[in-house]
Amino acid sequence: MKIYNTMTRQKEELQTLVEGEVRIYACGPTVYNFIHIGNARPICVFDTFRRYLEYRGWKVTFVQNFTDIDDKIIKRANEENSDYLTVSEKYIAEYQKDAAGLNVRAASVHPRATENIEQIIAMVKTLEEKGYAYATSYGDVYFRTNRFAEYGKLSHQPLEELEAGARIQIGDTKEDPMDFALWKGAKPGEPSWPSPWGEGRPGWHIECSAMAKRYLGATIDIHCGGQDLIFPHHENEVAQSECCNGVPFARYWMHNGYINVDNRKMSKSLNNFFTVRDVAQQYGYEPIRYLMLSSHYRSPINYSVEIIEQCKAALERLYNCREDLAFLASHAEGDFKEGEKEIQILLLTHKTDFITAMDDDFNTADAITALFELARDINVHVNARTNSSKALCDFALSLYGELADVLGLLYAKKEGTDEEVQKLIDRRTQARKEKNWAEADRIRDELKARGITIKDTPQGTIVVTE
């Protein structure tokens, strides 16, 4: 299995610190609002990456944090005449609703910055003792960027170029424009915690370094997040972690590409800013997940109404294949028949293609193509046959579900048809047998009025899941 490493700018064979185990840290949301569709991409992408690693037999420890203290959270709390804890708890709960809707599994650990103050302070103290950090008279503690000779190695920007765009603000007490805050001295009315430098709160970058170390170790296997985090967030994590711990921070860095809206950068000022909740209320959650996986994770992706509707239509084709197959399996009988072993072998070629795609830098776009090709051959060689054996149907159904589950797709459960609806379907089936087309159409329209869509297949009539 090869993945692209942002640090080395090349694909590398995945070799972890402990054979058969992989430790991943993913940067999570700052919880002051509903997550937007840009946030949804890393959430869905790296959930799928975790699923695939587990599918291939790896033991995965997946850590995703919540930033629950931050300038934005404090601002929101002031706007709502509330406090940071109420705001963060509210939006963590809202995140969990959206994550569940997107079929994103909970992380092994979801640490919060405020639950790790002790570890953060310990790391800042170590950096200060080693000469990499300094305190100011205001109770702030800054990292001395120029003390880390390799600063810029992740973003591939020399320190001199980075310094050219930096500025010291009026009233700033930094030694150098590039220095960044590890600890922020308390301001009136802000939440704070006691520290060796006085009351204050953690800087944004240090929380991830402290939590990665606590839950995964000084060196982790994979650190991942959005492309927008490469600089300065991840660059600063590398600097502070490696200076504090004296060992490499992460063996591999994975970053997903940006999302544009109607081919323009998403921005509130352009009135093209959409939350996951907004989109899900109109189109459902699953088309959003499908969109996030439909392109290679490192490529930019575009959101538009037309594209999300295409994603919804694509999912309907996949669902129709599964429903036809499940109906057939429930009525089929017997072991493999003559010629069906060849069909089984044909279907397995798509599993091989799926694994080949995913092993090559986690190419979900090609993996989805393999799933559609599997659906095509199931429709042609299994669903279209009137005498497919139960053994073949069950094999095809299992393989189809196996690959879809790796992608986290086709997770909507088909509700059981209640007795009254089933009786209407049976009456319609009998009417069709008697060529009483008017009665058959009447029952179809009655079901439709109840919000139930049916489909006539060679194997019988089925209820279509919307």
Image (cartoon, rainbow, N blue to C red):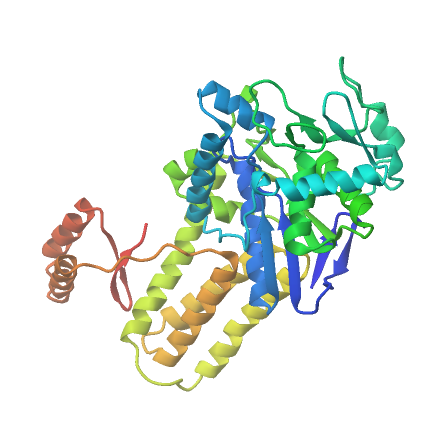
Residue 140 vs 338, above or below: the answer is above
The one nearer the camera, 169 or 230, is 169
**In the drawing, does residue 248 fall left or right of residue 298?**
right
**In the drawing, does residue 238 fall left or right of residue 371?**
right
Can residue 241 be seen here? The reply is yes
Image quarter in which the N terminus is found? bottom right
Image coordinates of residue 308 in percent, x first then y, are 47, 40
Residue occupying image coordinates x 87% and y 42%: 150
Residue 326 vs 117, above or below: the answer is below
Q: Determine the image quadrant of residue 227.
A: top right
Query: Residue farthest to the top?
Result: 170
The one nearer the camera, 138 or 393, is 138
**In the drawing, does residue 16 fall left or right of residue 429?**
right
Residue 299 vs 383, above or below: the answer is above
The one nearer the camera, 90 or 346, is 90
Residue occupying image coordinates x 10% and y 60%: 436
Q: Determine the image quadrant of residue 281.
A: top left
Residue occupying image coordinates x 45% and y 51%: 103
All told, the count of numbered labels is 0
Image coordinates of residue 313 in percent, x first then y, are 42, 47
Image coordinates of residue 326 in percent, x first then y, are 34, 67
Image coordinates of residue 429 in percent, x first then y, are 16, 64
Can residue 271 be seen here? The reply is no
Q: Determine the image quadrant of residue 137.
A: top right
Residue occupying image coordinates x 47% and y 19%: 79
